[in-house]
Amino acid sequence: MAALNIQKGASSHSAYDLRDPNAEIIESHTLAVLVENEPGVLARVIGLFSGRGYNIDSLTVAEVDHLGHRSRITIVTRGTPAVIEQIKAQLGRIVPVHDVHDLTVEGRSVERELGLFKVAGKGEKRVEALRIAEIFRASVVDSTLESFVFEITGTSEKLDAFAELMRPLGLSDQARTGVAALARGA
Amino acid sequence: MSRQMTGARMVIEALRDQGVDTVFGYPGGAVLPIYDEIFQQNDIKHILVRHEQGAVHMAEGYARSTGKPGVVLVTSGPGATNAVTGLTDALMDSIPLVVLTGQVPTFLIGTDGFQEADTIGITRPCTKHNWLVKETDQLAATIHKAFHIATSGRPGPVLIDIPKDVQFATGDYVGPKQIETPSYQPAKKGDLATITRLVELMETAERPILYTGGGVINSGTGASQLLRELAEATGFPVTSTLMGLGAYPASGGKWIGMLGMHGLYEANMAMHDCDLMIAVGARFDDRITGRVADFSPGSVKAQIDIDPSSINKVIRVDLPIVGDVGHVLEDMLKIWKARGRKTNAEGVRKWWVQIEQWKAKNCLGYRGSDKVIKPQYALQRLQALTAARKPYITTEVGQHQMWAAQFLHFDDPNHWMTSGGLGTMGYGLPASIGAQVAHPEALVINVAGEASWLMNMQEMGTAVQFRAPVKQFILNNERLGMVRQWQQLLHGERYSQSWSESLPDFVKLAEAFGCKGRTVSDPADLDAAIQEMIDYDGPFILDVLVEKHENCFPMIPSGKPHNEMLLGEAATEGAITGAGAALV
């Protein structure tokens, strides 16, 4: 914007500048998108986000109904309320999309992510890593004399906190699945 | 009962079952089996184009002038990539197209084979949906699905990529009745409670306006009829986007002209000052809204649209109604009549007094000349000399397009074809051929600028070959007129690359193509030239040399609201400043 000499909050914005820099609140929403499991459906969803400039914080996808050819895509995205509404409408427009659920507004939901963390170290640090892993109920899925791989499931925040604590103890690598989510209750 | 046949035969069989009479296409290695089948039948006419982009625009012209889907057949690789501009154009303007592309055989996909391109990947963002068919057994069902998706809901282009081995192989044919699209179920009927609330507002509104768009035309002629009935019965003024011209007749009593960046003063002022805006199949494009923050600040806004994503995309509306325009208008009228056909007659009467005052500005006024042909005058004469024939009009993109929208009058839907959303120069000539092929006896005119026209001029060969007597009405100012206008208003009169040098002699060009041409530069000769163009039995190029520096007004400069239009020869220097200068 600076190069074009448009001041922040200038009143002369047009349709090209829909984002009101002064007011709107950015919200994080978790969307569950049920899709026909056909080739290219993930590319359609991702292409929509990149083509229209929406954010993806996390994305997971897997087949959930083999006989019915259904997959479930869970997307965590951010935007103003108007942008979130537009994202949902645009997703709904994709031909192989069956349903779009906004788990953030449709009642309470459970969100979980799985992470694998490799921590390399010796002596005191190694013992401390194991102690913290116990507190977080992480399990050891691989072990050598100089390293552990921990597996941990929880909210993204819990995984963030675990990684933060492991960093000074020799965290050398991590892999995370992204968020899977379901509405609570029947 | 299924029948066995090759994939190539299936394509013809499926097109026939879908009622297709015309295909626009260009052969190549990866579609040869299908062309072999075309050779062996007479039900489907094939129009051989000169460039694949032309094929897609022709199919658009065919589709928009008939309401039926346009069908295109091209080869793999460059055939498919040349079609991309047309696909994007059709997506932006919601035109139903079924595009069939050849592909290298399945066993060569991914090997960078000769004329291989990732057609599905390339066209994914510029189609409503697309498919790569890897099994011949799936081909027929996919084609039927494609027609259903292209023509239902919000119409749009779809593409089917067919590898050559799938065309050769044998499989089961299924008919159009056996297909299902469980994940695709567009809504038709609008929510009755919301429609009733809208009717309540219509009963009390003092300054109502019907803001109509291409959705009315896409919904079918029934929707246009209902719109006319609604406007006449309520007395509400009607304005339209570029795409919606003809849905309500320009000769109708409630017509106040096109709105938007080059819309009429009265239409834009009415949009700005209304208290109830009823958007009917229109999507608040940035050419319509001007500065969003100041768009029609005092109105309650209702929007009828079949596409949920069109609602609240640009402008927040108070009453969203998702449904097909025809169905919703029908319910609206039914409810309004059942409640006693009430309007705020006194309020609406005063509203019309105000609108008449705006009309009195005569915003399309221009300085006439007896020495040089003014482009506006050329269009007025074209209108006068052709109106009785109810011509189909196509345009290219630029000043001439806006002048055509302002000065030509459309009394029927499906008679006006222009590239609205994408703004594709080179659209008009092929589109005129497509419309002419669909209506062989009709008068079809492409209002063009010389620069746009050159972009797809090779299609004159198609017009001559298939005896499509399209009239090319070129307003030749030897400039990229709209670019020049913006450079004058925005860029200190530095006319960077906006003149057309080394233009061809259009009369000789016409002769070279095997048709007829004429140049006219004297206003006194204009009528005779137009008459010769109309009377000539074949394609005709009329090269109208017009005033070179005429600007198109009214104009809402970028970043300005509706009530800050530039009119006529008003001082325009420095009209667009600050943030507006950055906008397109």
Image: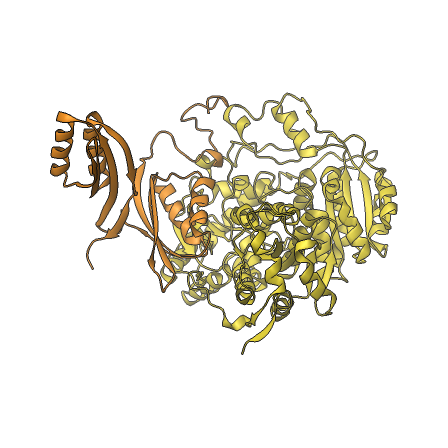
Chain colours: A orange, B yellow
In the picture as drawn, the residue positioned furthest to the bottom comes out as B1
Q: Is residue B544 above or below residue B190?
A: above
| Residue B149 appears in view | yes
Please provide percent x and percent y for residue B53.
Answer: 67, 48
Q: Nearer the viewer, residue A150 or B483?
A: A150
Q: Is residue B224 above or below residue B43?
A: above
Quarter occupied by the N terminus of chain B = bottom right
Q: Nearer the viewer, residue B309 or B522?
A: B309
| Residue B68 appears in view | no
Please provide percent x and percent y for residue A15.
Answer: 48, 37
Report whether B544 appears left or right of A59.
Answer: right
> For the image shown, how many numbered marks are present on the structure?
0
Quarter occupied by the C terminus of chain B = top right
In the picture as drawn, the residue positioned furthest to the front comes out as A145
Please provide percent x and percent y for residue B129.
Answer: 51, 54
Quarter-of-image position of residue B494: top right
Please provide percent x and percent y for residue B234.
Answer: 50, 58
Q: Nearer the viewer, residue B475 or B436?
A: B436
Report whether B477 appears left or right of B165.
Answer: right
Residue shown at the point (36%, 65%) measured from the top left: A67
